[in-house]
Amino acid sequence: MPCVADWLNNPFGIVQGIFAQNVPNSDWEKKVTEYFKEKLKENNATNWVPSLNDVPVHYLKPNSLVKFRCMVQDMFDPEFYMGVYETVDPNTKARVLHFGKYRDVAECGPQQEIDLNSSQTVTSERQTFYCVPVPGESAWVKEISFLPSYQARVSPSTSYTPSRHKRSYEEDEDMDLHPSKQKEQHMGNGRSGGDIHGCVEPKRLETEASVGHHLISPNCSPPLDLNFPLPGEKGPACLVKVYESWDSFKVNDVLEVYGILSVDPVLSIVNNEERDSSALDPMECMDTAEEQRVHSPPASLVPRIHVILAQKLQHINPLLPACLNEEESKTCEYLNLTSLFVSNFMSELSPVRAELLGFLTHALLGDSLAAEYLILHLISTVYARRDVLPLGKFTVNLSGCPRNSIFTEHIYRIIQQLVPASYRLQMTIENMNHSRFIPHKDYAANRLVSGVLQLASNTSLVVDETQLEQGQLDTTGVHNVAALGNLITWQKVDYDFSYHQMEFPCNINVLITSEGRSLLPSDCQVHLQPQIIPPNMEEYMNSLLTAVLPSVLNKFRIYLSLLRLLDYSISDEVTKAVEEDFVEMRKTDPESITADDLHRTLLVARFLSLSAGQTTLSRERWLRAKQLEALRKARLQQQKCVNGNEL
């Protein structure tokens, strides 16, 4: 029976064993998936798989099993590869079958050649996703997810000691310019796997049918853009190669993948030789130089992962239970564990809510009404779409914030500590005019160039309008403001494909902080009424964060993430009572009660119920929602009278 070291450090050995036992039966691929699925179900097995999110790639053993939590930033064209191929010994005529799955290059033994005309050859197809770490992922998510598990393995182990420090992009370019430093053999490769006559040491052959190539001199190339949506992001970008059910994944999905790490330097060598050969015959390659450069970056900078198991994630909160795959989530064992976790947490929900309300009230300078609405905002989520209307979005405009103050910055810091992913967008004229908000298609490189609004589902976006000063928006600025408005109103971003726009639905929680009423649309405006004015805002906010216990902070994080996942319904009886109540309100004050007011009050009632752990609307929660809305409107009216203008 293989030990842990075997399937972690040498997954190819496991695959080879299963392949050898089951050829020519095609079930070997399914058995490989089942084997690793069972291994990862074992006690804490997933914790022993190194993560590219945490461990630098130069510390990881090539061809070992790794995992990666990521967002699909782009999809490349499907590529063909040799799933099964046959080698022949020219002397003895002995033939051996090999698998090409999970490999970038095909391998054969000494004194063997690949028989491209073999009847045993199987051509297969795989999909390549360009994946980046989840944009705006909070530091606490990384710390809880990775640090406890990998402290022992970040240092070089006896099983694998890095032979070099991580090369920079410039060093990779130098290796591309001088491939003789690495390669020991000459290789040729056609776009469809043809015209390869043999293999010598180390017996490798490119298996990709549509691999990229460097047509232009690397030292003339600009630095490689890893295409992160948000500025200042760190972490690896990866080419994730998926073999099964890739049509179930789409751009902006968050995935956790388990697969075989490929950082083979031979990829750069192949690209060099492809570049040289295509210079002789331009018809050999129809890709542009920029496309080849983007689609086949140096493996040391953008490693490849050949996926054995992949799962689309509902959330990235490491404090909540997660399953390895969707099928497993349906098993009795998983359902029992999840049910136990939920029921245990629900039993202490009321004190957690009270503590969170107190914490946010202090953060909002003693304003408990604003704290109530902030809780409702943080647990809101788009639960359905009716035609083009997203149901469940709850964008809050927190007006009355001090202008040019560090208050809004600290409010964002507190939100960062509560939610798994977030981003603060400072709405300055400079940012509006020069930032890239909308992703667009670069046809020369055949890739989707990311923008600030390419975010994963359930990301909290804090738009700080207090930074806005007088100035002129140019064309880009106008488009960016319009894109923000569309995101808030319709929960979609129209990606720019030059000749047309393509709608990408999203689920982004937007909080707008502003001095007066925001220029952007919102579902609910809450005017801040500070009850305390700290003499030192920085000191006050810092002490607030340091005073809360880590265990309490973790309860807040579980509370906000868990309540987003709960189902909610309204009984026919309560629906009828709400309708009758609305009719009575219209009779009393027909001018001030509109259909929009009803919709907003129903939203407030929904999130009030969920915030208390109730998945159905009760009469009590409906009355409380009406009370909160009355207080909020009265405050706005009072402010309007004071200022003499509309807020």
Image (spheres, grey):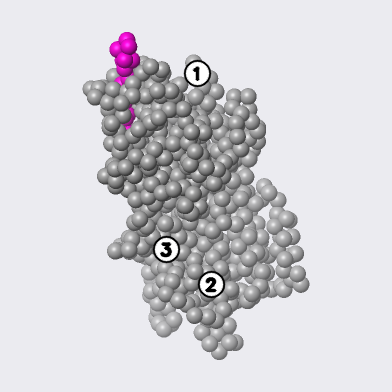
Q: Determine whether label 3 and label 1 are within 8 Å by CB.
A: no
Q: Is residue 165 left or right of residue 478?
A: right
Corner quadrant of residue 22: top left
Camera-nearest label, 3 or 2: 2
User: Quick check: 106 above or below 236?
Assistant: above
Instruction: Say few, some or many: other residues with alpha carbon within 10 Å of mark 2 (under 14 / 14 to 19 / 20 or more).
Output: some
Q: Which residue is mark 1?
A: 2
Q: Which residue is mark 2?
A: 430
Corner quadrant of residue 319: top right
Q: SS class of the residue under badge 2? A: helix
User: Quick check: 221 above or below 69?
Assistant: below
Q: Which residue is mark 3?
A: 438
Camera-nearest label, 2 or 1: 2
Please name the predominant secondary structure of the magenta segment in the image.
Answer: strand
Q: Residue 83 in magenta?
A: yes
Badge 2 or badge 1: first in the primary sequence: 1
Badge 3 or badge 1: first in the primary sequence: 1
Q: Is residue 124 left or right of residue 439?
A: left
> Which residue is located at x 41 percent, y 60 percent?
439
> Which residue is located at x 24 percent, y 24 percent?
117
Name, please, the residue furthest toward the top: 92
Q: Amino acid at mark 1?
A: Pro
Badge 3 or badge 2: first in the primary sequence: 2
User: Quick check: 406 above or below 618?
Assistant: below
Q: Which residues are magenta?
A: 80-95
